[in-house]
Amino acid sequence: RKVNPQVVAAKRKEGDSLMAQGEKALQTGLFKWTPDFEMASGHFQKAGVAYQLAGLFDNSIKAYKRAAHCCVQMKTEYSAGKAIEAAAKIDESRKSYENAAQLYNKAADYYCHSGYNEKSADMYIKGSKVLESMDKPNLVEAAKMLESALNAFEADGKEYMG
């Protein structure tokens, strides 16, 4: 697939600008006593998308992690889970399976804390599959993640048909 260098440069510039706006929203001063985590989170999310479109995956993951941090500060763990899940998908697509599994695990924790046990279980399952996909599969950790998925389903208390 051909990549247009002008589009990449524009998306990188957009991402850099959004990151700067996000960091600015977190600053406090004489007339602004508390950081604006909501505004910052939005900027970081958009920066993550822009960097991803530019093919700057490390920057994208960093932006999604910053967005997740802001979401946690606002006590919106579900949104933090979405941001970390987006970062995990990037690592998975780059075959950085160990990092992807860790991020899926973290996303699962955020979803669980926000009461979305089924979504949490899905993240544990994705993390397990990623660990099984490695050149040297980490089956012990994969099994632990599957056990966590089972516990999340059980905590939900619903009947699941599969």
Image (cartoon, rainbow, N blue to C red):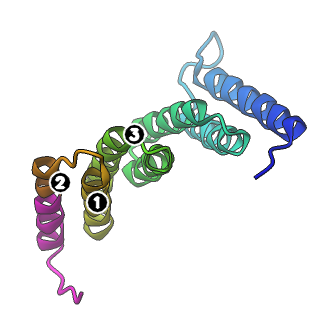
Q: Please tell me whether residue 88 is drawn above or below residue 8 in the rendered image.
A: below
CA distance separating discs 3 and 2:
26 Å
Q: Please tell me whether residue 16 is drawn above or below residue 155 in the rendered image.
A: above
Q: Which residue is mark 2?
A: 142
| Residue type marked 2 | Ala
**Residue 72: which numbered mark, if any?**
3
**Residue 42: which numbered mark, if any?**
none
Residue 5 occupies quadrant = top right
Left of 123 or right of it: where is 141? left
- Residue 37 % position (x, y): 54, 34
| Residue type marked 3 | Val
Mark 2 residue element: helix
Residue at 62% in and 22% down: 23
Q: Which badge, 2 or 1, is on the more N-terminal residue?
A: 1
Find out whether residue 156 is within the magenta segment: yes
Q: For the stretch drawn in magenta, what is the main secondary structure?
A: helix
- Magenta span: 146-162
Residue at 17% in and 71% down: 153
Mark 1 residue element: helix
Find out whether residue 159 is within the magenta segment: yes
**Residue 129: which numbered mark, if any?**
1
Q: Nearer the viewer, mark 3 or mark 2?
A: 2
- Residue 103 % position (x, y): 35, 43
Mark 3 residue element: helix
Which residue is situated farthest in the top direction here?
Answer: 30
Q: Around disc 1, counting alpha carbons within 10 Å, would you say few (fewer than 14), some (14 to 19), or many (20 or more)? A: some
Left of 34 or right of it: where is 42? right
Residue at 46% in and 41% down: 71
